Image (tube, helix red, strand yellow):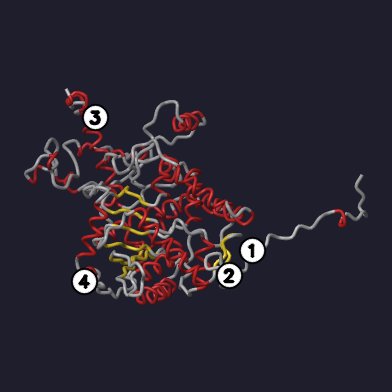
Amino acid sequence: MCQVDEDYHDQFEHADPPSVSKKCVKCKEVTAAVVIRAKDVYCRCCFKEYFIHKFRAMLGKNRIVFPGEKVLLAVSGGPSSCSMLSQVQEGLSQNAHKKLRFLPGIVYIDEGGAVGQSVKDRQRTVAELQAVFKATGFPFHIVPLEQVLDLPSSVVMKAPSPSERPASAYKAAVDNFIQNDSSSCLTPQEQEETSLPDIQECHTQLLQQLIGSAKTLTAREDLLNTLRQHLLVHTARTEGYSKLMLGDNCTRVAVKLLTSISLGRGAQLAQDTGFSDFRYDDVILVRPMRDYSAKEIAYYNHMFKVPSVFIPNLDTKTTDKASIQHLTETFVTKLQTDFPSTVSTIYRTSEKLQTACKSSSTADHSDRCLLCMCALDTAVEDASAVKATLISEQLSGATTTEIPRQNLTPVNTESTAPTGQCCSSGTGEDCGSAASGEGSCSSAKAPETTDLKSLLCYSCQLTIKDMSSVDPLPQYILSEAQRRLRRSHMREVISEFLLDDGDEAD
């Protein structure tokens, strides 16, 4: 039996920690300066070449960004997005070995109003980021999150998709770009001297009321992410950009994958974590940093003096269990400390996942979620997890069937149209050909209670369910919800007169 005073130190063998080579694994001459993994040690020069090559290889392998295209870089001020900005600046420099061939711009979404920052703190943050942006020479746009309250309904509507290009189109575009005077095509754009626009205090209060209407931090973060993405896409459209680059790194993608599964977004994993995201049709979201770990980015930024700005967010100074997103991030990072292959394993697994739902790029407008714009995953068979969850809620007494919406602001065409008159008769057009596309003859009979549940995917349903009221939602979301419900009601009324796809084939 073990005794307290017994000494076992001599009986155990002390294993030496695994040693790594002190020479760079690539050039095998210079002493290593950074250790990425146990067998991946690089000197300063080789590490920089490795980092730059990985970024350009990611863009070249996927062939999403065509030569001469305008690409908007979403920079949040964090290490990953600032490193992405540094890579684009490096790729467009005169001494670059293989120069990038697109026209970049920068956008920064100021979320200080949502997290309760003072105007003085927000202006100081913007001033720091302006200094970083001006050093690049790229045009930049600083947009406060309060502008999301005034977005048009077109943000959550299906935009006309550009014509699909064949596989050989990329090579033809590169050859045409090289044959022409590439220097004239990539002349630097005039840099816009922008500052934080004047923000009305009432708009900030409305934004805080909107974020605060969510009861849990999980729902607030999810809602903030949706609003941010809507504003980014709207900025890209209004400024003429066809691609939107995000700074999600490998660690962030791994955390997002597990978080999405926990929040019921399993059907949207391909769009949320993939290299390219086509849910918005005319604006393609691209994640060129998804092959970099947070450790690699931190080393690169430190060694080559890449500036970044710390900006507090909703989960700053909160406990690990404050939200599902924060808890998942803590779990992955702590596991990565003891098991260095954790993030890469999750990341590689995400590349193999595919959804059985209709893709967002081919789904009809009415079959997309009102908030995240992904294909709806609620139209499933009875023997499914979604149906089982709904049955469990009904048996437990949960009343989540409808979300009341009082005092909806009617569309102007409805309020002026008399009973029995076509809603668009004032313009001389019928409902089907009205340019605004806002309603139908039955729009004046729209119910006062808006059932948003039928317009949302399962995950967004949970977010809306967690809100105390949908009154604070931006008007562009509520007006689009009304329009979709009117269209759905009109389709039900005339359903017996419509031909099925099978009948059209006959």
Quarter of the view holding residue 12: bottom right
Return the residue nearer the eye: 442 or 477. Answer: 477
Which residue lies at the image location 23% right of the left edge and 37% below the top edge? 487
- List x then y, in percent, for residue 21: 62, 65
The first of marks 4 and 2 along the sequence is 2
Q: Which mark is residue 20?
A: 1
Residue type, numbered disc 1: Val
Q: Are marks 2 and 1 in contact (CB under 8 Å)?
A: yes
Residue type, numbered disc 2: Ala
Classify 298 as above or below 494. below
Q: Are marks 1 and 3 in contact (CB under 8 Å)?
A: no
The residue mark sitting in front, 4 or 1, is 1
The first of marks 4 and 3 along the sequence is 4
- List x then y, in percent, for residue 151: 28, 56
Element carrying mark 2: loop
Q: Which residue is mark 3?
A: 492
Q: Between marks 4 and 1, how big is the CA–CA gap?
A: 49 Å
| Quarter of the figure with the C terminus | top left
